[in-house]
Image (tube, helix red, strand yellow):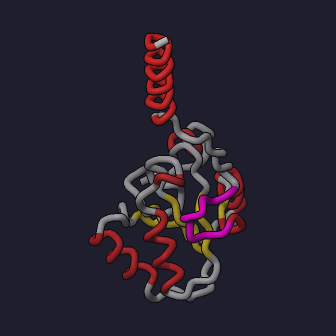
Amino acid sequence: MKKSFLAVCFGLATLVFSVSGLKAQTTPVSPEVPAAADPWKASELLDPATLAGLLKAGNAPLIFNIGAVEDIKTAKHVGPVGEAKFLAKFKNMIAALPKNTQVVIYCGCCALPKCPNVRPAYQELKAAGFTNIRVLNIVVNLKTNWIAAGFPLSDK
């Protein structure tokens, strides 16, 4: 009986230790739905194919590359605004623009939910009073979601 009791205790202890390392399953965030920490609304996300279509039609908004990746055609290159010197550069670049300017920001270094540059740029635009901001919805990275799709890059 004593051995059975010890075996049961050991089994329970093993079960507790193995279960304690498990994590609850979470629902993955859809690329169309921003994470709770994102400051933008889902309606402010812009699909890469839509932006490429606007570029092709000659109706492109003002585009800012706020990362360290290749420039999309017509994009103004800022640099990774997660760094203070590039955020200051971005502030200077937008300072004189009308607040209703159609602005698209993108980084493309990684998937949008992990990007260290988009949130500071978006928050700066909002703080400066811009009312027509779009965030390019980069699901994987610029190479996958823009370049591999054959969308236009800057000729520079």
Q: Main SS of the magenta segment?
A: loop
Identify which residue, 4 or 140, lies in the foreground.
4
- Residue 98, above or below 117: below
Q: Which residue, as the protein is rendered here, is positioned at the far front?
A: 1
**Magenta stretch: includes residue 37:** yes
Q: Residue 127: x percent and y percent?
A: 49, 85
Q: Residue 23: x percent and y percent?
A: 53, 39
Residue 8 visible in the displayed image: yes
- Quadrant (top left/top right/bottom left/bottom right) for the C terminus: bottom left
**Residue at the spot x=48%, y=51% of the render?**
108
- In the image, 7: left or right of 92? right
Q: Which residue, as the protein is rendered here, is positioned at the far left?
A: 85
Q: Residue 46: x percent and y percent?
A: 66, 60
**Residue at the spot x=37%, y=82% of the render?**
92
* Segment colored magenta: 33-41
**Residue at the spot x=46%, y=14% of the render?**
7
Q: In which quadrant of the rendered view does residue 104 lie?
A: bottom right
- In the image, 30: left or right of 13? right
Identify which residue, 68 or 153, lies in the foreground.
68
Identify which residue, 20 or 2, lies in the foreground.
2
- Residue 64, above or below 143: below
**Residue at the spot x=68%, y=64% of the render?**
58
Q: How many marks?
A: 0
**Magenta stretch: includes residue 87:** no
Q: Residue 15: x percent and y percent?
A: 50, 26
Residue 154 visible in the displayed image: no
